[in-house]
Image: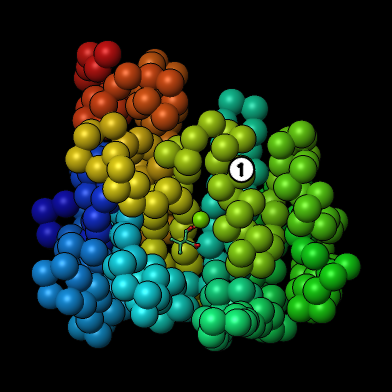
Amino acid sequence: MSGRGSKKVAIVAGDGIGPEVVESALAVLEAVGADFERVPVEIGLVRWKRTGLAMSEEDLAALKECDCILFGAISTPPDPNYKSVLLRIRKELDLYANIRPFQSQNLDFIIVRENTEGLYSGIEEMDAERAQTMRIITRRGSERIAEKACDLAASRQKLTIIHKSNVLKSDRLFLRTCQATAKRRGVPYEDMLVDAAAYNMVTNPRRFDVLVTTNLFGDILSDEAAGVIGSLGLCASANIGTDHALFEPIHGSAPDIAGKSIANPIGAMRSAAMMMRWLDEPEMASRIEAAVQEGLASGARTPDLGGNSRTVDVTRAVVGLLRGRDTNWS
Ligand code: IPM
Ligand code: MG
């Protein structure tokens, strides 16, 4: 990462544990020889405290100019008028597909979450007596997320469309559109009500392969899935649009554990691997994934996994494996 590479990657470390885990991800990228220009963009709470603004138009333009974004975590400023900065980035860059793979020893499934509409449309109002939030589902929005899910399901077993169409008209459109897309693409599919999916996720998660769902259902089910595989700290995600992409661990900024070097950096490392795959470097991605697996298997585990390694120990372990060195982290 000397700056010689033709690719430009925006680095948004953010706040809370964001900077710690991004540092780990960058160390791992360096160890596999990833060659790109780093473009640091300061966005988030720290910036808001300093300047009164969490993200400027120039920041957004800088993000758009890069090939993609490596993201840590940011806390939304404690101002009721402030909307989530992350949601704004997803919307402005039209990152419509949130792809969240979940892997453990005996589990391997992917949640494909619609990322720009549904209950996150931002059309809402509130007074002292009443509040309402519009749940917008469009045919185009449903079709493009279904297409993305079918791309993934095509080389796997099946697609499960998750919805609540017995109650919500908006989900009837979502379901119908996903079914039509899967049929046209020749992808085997089934559908499941979201409450049943939540139950199955705990009782029989192996029945899942690729899941596609609306924004809030995907948000909730992905935290549940993270619990099922062992920790939120293990999980990565890719937010993909037509022209842009952002890679982030699915955990948040966790201010309560920030600065203690106990944050699990694996989610950020796996997000870096997803980024390399997206940048057309599948070999580097596979090497990172394999080293992470090996590091975990040999006991490099932060407290969320019941271990007592520190963030820096896990990082050293994975980097050591990638560089082919013996490391001692316990
Ligand atoms: C996630 C997070 C975000 C979401 C928050 C931080 C707005 O929970 O990425 O899952 O709800 O999408
Ligand atoms: Mg979430």
Mark yes or no: residue 26 visible. Answer: no
Residue 198 drawn at (x, y percent): 73, 47
Mark yes or no: residue 227 visible. Answer: yes
Q: Residue at x 61, y 35 (%)?
A: 228
Q: Dot 1: what SS?
A: helix
**Residue type of the residue flagged with mark 1:** Ala
- Camera-side residue of 215 and 319: 215
Q: Residues within 10 Å of mark 1 (few under 14, many from 20)?
A: many
- Camera-side residue of 148 and 216: 216
Q: Residue at x 28, y 79 (%)?
A: 60
**Residue hosting label 1:** 225
Q: Is residue 23 left or right of residue 231?
A: left
Residue 320 picture quarter: top left
Residue 310, relative to residue 277: is it above or below? Answer: above
Residue 162, relative to residue 271: is it above or below? Answer: below
Q: Is residue 37 left or right of residue 89?
A: left
- Camera-side residue of 8 and 298: 298
Residue 225 drawn at (x, y percent): 61, 43
Q: Residue furthest right?
A: 166
